[in-house]
Image (spheres, coloured by chain):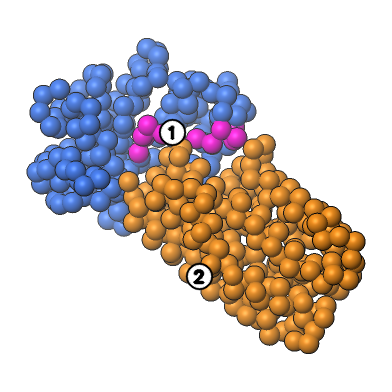
């Protein structure tokens, strides 16, 4: 446990320091959502109907933006070699790294959501619903994205490849995340069904993600 | 304790680096791996560290901790120093001490031994190449591992640093440790030579 908490603390600390990834994600999220009302125009009804989709898209892209650094930095400076050799199973180390990434870059997005909901003419209930779906859904984005990040390291290709690999996996999360939020705002579906599926997606990726990422890193040993 | 390899074959990128390599080293012994550039010195160290998969042959550590695999009993000091520029010297070292686990000694003492205890609060990004290497050596001292795998360990170290490092290696061997070092320069301690791929 000491080993894993040390890894989580280190990654969060690096992310929060100057040049870390945490702030970049939130700033990107902020930019996308702030610009959207200007692009859509002053139609308040339209804006509130699009609101959950915009917030979800912003959060998805913001988490993709910072995910490719998840293993790349450790690979480039040799830390990944030592992590692979250590007495902690690689699967657990991967899970710890993803958890740290979510705490440092996913959680701030959810905290920022209520403020950004105001800009999109969402009422309290709708904003709460979007924040709740983001809380349930962003772990799935991080843990499936981790697979892409691990593949990007082993294939020595960064950025674009990762987006291509990860985007199809995040589509179900996006669909059910937006569906659950829309259910609260316009109906006629109930909130419970899509939200349960969203939670299930997160739980599945929590299990599969670390194993797939560790297998990819082991296979690509070089 | 004895580290031995037999008939090791190494293939990287579809090209055979070396084949039929045998070696052995006992506790308290240093093995200096020599050979021209590209002969596979680093590859051999990474094979022992479990960071490459051999295309043939076996590597085994007899008389170590039966509960642990060979890589788990090794320290690997490579070209890349596994330091985070955003973290301070002390944070870098204490992270590796906590993460690697096992038997450990005082981090502050290790930093004093390698001679960078005056810079503990400095971000590692501001260290010189020699200081970074010293900080990597502090990791070897803080966390105890019986097998040290060293890749060009003395690069960037000044003369005093090389002397300090020699005495660290002697202490490690005296405690029953084992060293495999890839090197071009003389290691500075009594060692047996393992030549890969013909004369340099």
Dominant secondary structure (helix, strand or loop) of the stretch shown in magenta: loop
Instruction: Read off the residue under disc 1.
Output: B81
* Circles 2 and 1 on the same subunit: no
Foreground residue among A155 and A142? A155
Provide residue B83's location: percent of width, then percent of height: 50, 35
Task: Give the number of the disc on residue B6.
Answer: none
Q: Quadrant of residue B18?
A: top left
Determine if the magenta segment contains residue A76. no
Instruction: Say how many tags the image has.
Output: 2
Q: Is residue B92 left or right of residue A78?
A: right
Question: Tag 2: Cα neighbours inside 10 Å, few (<14), some, or many (≥20)?
Answer: some
Q: Quadrant of the C terminus of chain B?
A: top left
Rendered position, B111 above or below A64: above
- In the rendered image, what is the letter of the chain coloured orange? A
**Which residue is at 71% across, 65% downward?**
A56
**Which residue is at 68% across, 50% downward?**
A25
Label 1 secondary element? loop
Foreground residue among A116 and A35? A35
Instruction: Read off the residue under disc 2.
Output: A207
- In the rendered image, what is the letter of the chain coloured blue? B
Label 2 secondary element? helix
Question: Tag 1: Cα neighbours inside 10 Å, few (<14), some, or many (≥20)?
Answer: many
Q: Quadrant of residue A213?
A: bottom left
**Which residue is at 31% across, 57% downward?**
B67
Quote the CA–CA distance across marks 2 and 1.
32 Å
Question: Label 2 marks which chain's residue?
Answer: A
Provide residue B37's location: percent of width, then percent of height: 23, 27
Question: Label 1 marks which chain's residue?
Answer: B
Provide residue B93's location: percent of width, then percent of height: 51, 36
**Which residue is at 12% across, 32% downward?**
B197
Query: Which residue range is magenta in the image?
Result: B76-88
């Amino acid at each position: 446990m000491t080993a894993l908490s040390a890894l989580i603390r280190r990654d969060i600390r690096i992310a929060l320091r100057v040049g870390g990834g945490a702030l970049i994600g939130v700033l990107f999220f902020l930019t996308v959502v702030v610009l959207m009302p200007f692009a859509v125009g002053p139609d308040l009804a339209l804006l509130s109907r699009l609101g959950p989709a915009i917030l979800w898209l912003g959060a998805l892209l913001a988490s993709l933006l910072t995910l490719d650094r998840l293993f790349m930095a450790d690979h480039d400076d040799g830390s990944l070699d030592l992590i692979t050799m250590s007495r902690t199973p690689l699967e657990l180390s991967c899970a710890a790294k993803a958890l740290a990434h979510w705490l440092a870059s996913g959680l701030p997005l959810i905290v920022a959501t209520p403020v950004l909901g105001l800009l999109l003419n969402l009422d309290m209930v709708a904003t709460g619903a979007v924040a709740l779906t983001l809380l349930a859904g962003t772990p799935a984005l991080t843990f499936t994205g981790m697979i892409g990040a691990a593949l990007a390291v082993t294939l020595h290709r960064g950025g674009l490849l990762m987006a291509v690999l990860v985007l199809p996996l995040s589509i179900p999360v996006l669909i059910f995340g937006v569906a659950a939020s829309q259910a609260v705002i316009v109906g006629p579906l109930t909130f419970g069904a899509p939200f349960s599926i969203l939670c299930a997606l997160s739980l599945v990726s929590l299990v599969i993600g670390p194993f797939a990422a560790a297998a990819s890193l082991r296979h690509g040993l070089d | 304790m004895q580290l031995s390899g037999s008939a090791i074959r190494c293939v990287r990128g579809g090209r055979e680096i070396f084949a039929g390599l045998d070696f052995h080293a006992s506790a308290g012994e240093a093995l200096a791996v020599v050979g021209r550039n590209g002969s596979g010195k680093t590859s051999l160290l990474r094979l022992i560290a479990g960071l490459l998969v051999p295309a043939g042959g076996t590597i085994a550590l007899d008389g170590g901790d039966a509960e642990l695999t060979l890589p788990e009993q090794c320290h690997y000091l490579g070209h890349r120093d596994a330091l985070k520029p955003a973290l301070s010297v002390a944070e870098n070292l204490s992270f590796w001490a906590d993460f690697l686990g096992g038997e450990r000694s005082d981090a502050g003492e290790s930093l004093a031994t390698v001679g960078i205890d005056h810079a503990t609060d400095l971000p590692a990004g501001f260290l010189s190449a020699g200081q970074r290497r010293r900080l990597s050596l502090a990791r070897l001292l803080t966390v105890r591992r019986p097998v040290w795998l060293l890749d060009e360990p003395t690069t960037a170290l000044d003369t005093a640093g090389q002397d300090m490092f020699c005495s660290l290696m002697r202490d490690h061997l005296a405690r029953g440790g084992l060293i495999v070092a890839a090197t071009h320069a003389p290691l500075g301690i009594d060692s047996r030579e393992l030549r890969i791929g013909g004369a340099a």
